């Protein structure tokens, strides 16, 4: 009888111990899974993001926002992927100009095409925004939209970034990928609102960011419908600019293509300032984020004087109004997915 009681007691103790161990393991597992932003350093920046999402996504809370109104907009260049030493779409345009040059002997002595063909960065810089627009327009036009998409996809598969020797679409920011996923898990609809070409970004946005093409807002050229030689309907890209989705164009693009004022906006440059201001001006809970490039070792360090991604007025306003300034060096454990935590 005594032996039986001891066996029962021992079995109960072992069962209780096993349950306790399982509870501890489960709690540790839950804790590990509970961190939605593992590539973000613990601190005020990460805390502000999680607290905002919690507030607007908690039913019955004082700042609850209905899912249909949880709109988040992100700039692309410098906010979701790198933009140095020059915007990646410009790199694509340069490569297209070189590929098309044999068909255009007049480009050999005409700027800015001569500079693009010869990879003369100084002459390209001297051509300014007008010169870049000429190059982008000439390199993107004269083909169907389907052919253009395939050309972009082929370029992304073969081209490599000059510093990292990685495909350009691998230079996306791991912390931002986590943030996009976290927002969608909490009922947000995520959009790209960028100065980049809308048809260029749509080639990779869904595969890279999980953002479908209909949620990409960008600059666009004129497109014309016509019947091809075999009678098949097609859309042809023409050498004319239709809409520039940059600076004051961003809130216009949001109004035109999204139709709702966002409650969260992320940018990294003065070209994003009006989008950030437009988002902040709405009622209720708002989150305004700026990616500040401060890591010259893992990425680049630049802001007020950079010809690419200049961050001056937006930084001043962000500091004055208490917007969340993401210090890349301090706040991100890793920059790119191919780096290890």
Image (cartoon, rainbow, N blue to C red):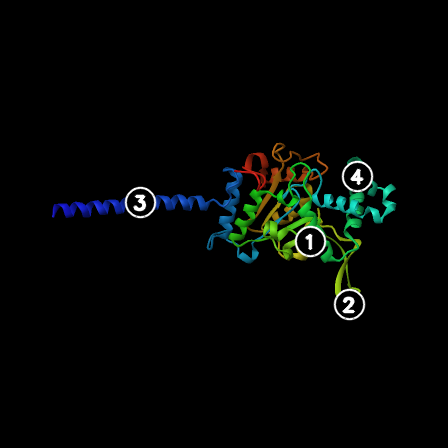
Location of residue 332 by image quarter = top right
Labels 1, 2: front one: 2
Circle 1 sits in a helix, a strand or a loop, which is it? helix
Residue 323 horizontal/vertical position (percent): 59, 41
**Disc sitting over residue 262 in the figure:** none
Q: Earlier in the sequence, mark 3 or mark 1?
A: 3
Residue placed under numbered mark 2 in the picture: 231
Q: Earlier in the sequence, mark 1 or mark 4?
A: 4
Circle 2 sits in a helix, a strand or a loop, which is it? loop
Residue placed under numbered mark 3 in the picture: 20
Q: Earlier in the sequence, mark 4 or mark 3?
A: 3
Task: Please determine whether, in this image, residue 330 is positioned above or below residue 7.
Answer: above
Q: Earlier in the sequence, mark 1 or mark 2?
A: 2
Disc 2 crowd, CA 10 A, few/some/many (<14, 14-19, 20+): few
Residue placed under numbered mark 4 in the picture: 124
**Disc sitting over residue 253 in the figure:** 1
Disc 1 crowd, CA 10 A, few/some/many (<14, 14-19, 20+): many
Residue 339 horizontal/vertical position (percent): 56, 38
Q: CA gap, disc 3 to disc 1? A: 56 Å
Circle 3 sits in a helix, a strand or a loop, which is it? helix
Labels 2, 3: front one: 2
Labels 2, 4: front one: 2
Q: Are marks 2 and 4 in contact (CB under 8 Å)?
A: no
Disc 3 crowd, CA 10 A, few/some/many (<14, 14-19, 20+): few
**Point 73% across, 43% down: residue:** 91
Residue 96 horizontal/vertical position (percent): 76, 47
Q: CA gap, disc 2 to disc 3? A: 72 Å
Q: Earlier in the sequence, mark 2 or mark 3?
A: 3
């Amino acid at each position: 009888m005594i032996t039986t009681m001891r066996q029962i007691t021992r079995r109960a103790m072992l069962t209780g111990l096993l349950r306790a161990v399982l509870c501890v393991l489960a709690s540790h597992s839950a804790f590990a899974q509970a961190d939605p932003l593992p590539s973000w350093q613990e601190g005020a920046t990460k805390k502000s993001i999680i607290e905002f999402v919690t507030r607007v996504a908690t039913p019955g809370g004082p700042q609850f926002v209905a899912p249909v109104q949880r709109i988040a907009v992100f700039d692309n260049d410098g906010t979701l992927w790198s933009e140095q030493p020059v915007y990646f779409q410009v790199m694509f345009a340069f490569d297209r100009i070189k590929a098309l040059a044999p068909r255009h002997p007049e480009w050999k002595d005409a700027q800015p095409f001569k500079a693009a063909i010869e990879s003369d960065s100084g002459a390209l810089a001297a051509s300014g925004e007008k010169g870049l627009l000429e190059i982008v327009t000439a390199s993107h036009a004269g083909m169907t939209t389907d052919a253009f998409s395939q050309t972009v996809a082929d370029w992304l598969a073969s081209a490599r970034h000059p510093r990292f020797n990685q495909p350009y679409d691998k230079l996306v920011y791991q912390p931002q990928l986590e943030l996009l996923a976290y927002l969608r898990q909490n009922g947000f609809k995520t959009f790209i609102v960028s100065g980049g070409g809308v048809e260029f970004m749509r080639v990779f946005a869904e595969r890279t960011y999980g953002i479908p093409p209909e949620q990409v807002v960008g600059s666009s050229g004129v497109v014309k419908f016509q019947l091809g030689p075999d009678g098949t309907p097609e859309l042809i890209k023409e050498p004319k600019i239709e809409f520039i989705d940059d600076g004051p164009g961003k809130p216009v693009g949001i109004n035109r293509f999204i139709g709702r004022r966002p409650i969260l906006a992320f940018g990294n440059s003065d070209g994003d300032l009006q989008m950030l201001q437009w988002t902040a001006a709405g009622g209720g809970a708002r989150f305004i984020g700026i990616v500040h490039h401060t890591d010259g070792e893992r990425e680049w360090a630049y802001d007020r004087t950079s010809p690419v991604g200049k961050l001056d007025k937006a930084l001043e306003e962000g500091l004055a109004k208490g917007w969340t300034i993401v210090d890349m060096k301090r706040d991100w454990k890793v920059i790119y997915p191919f780096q290890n935590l």
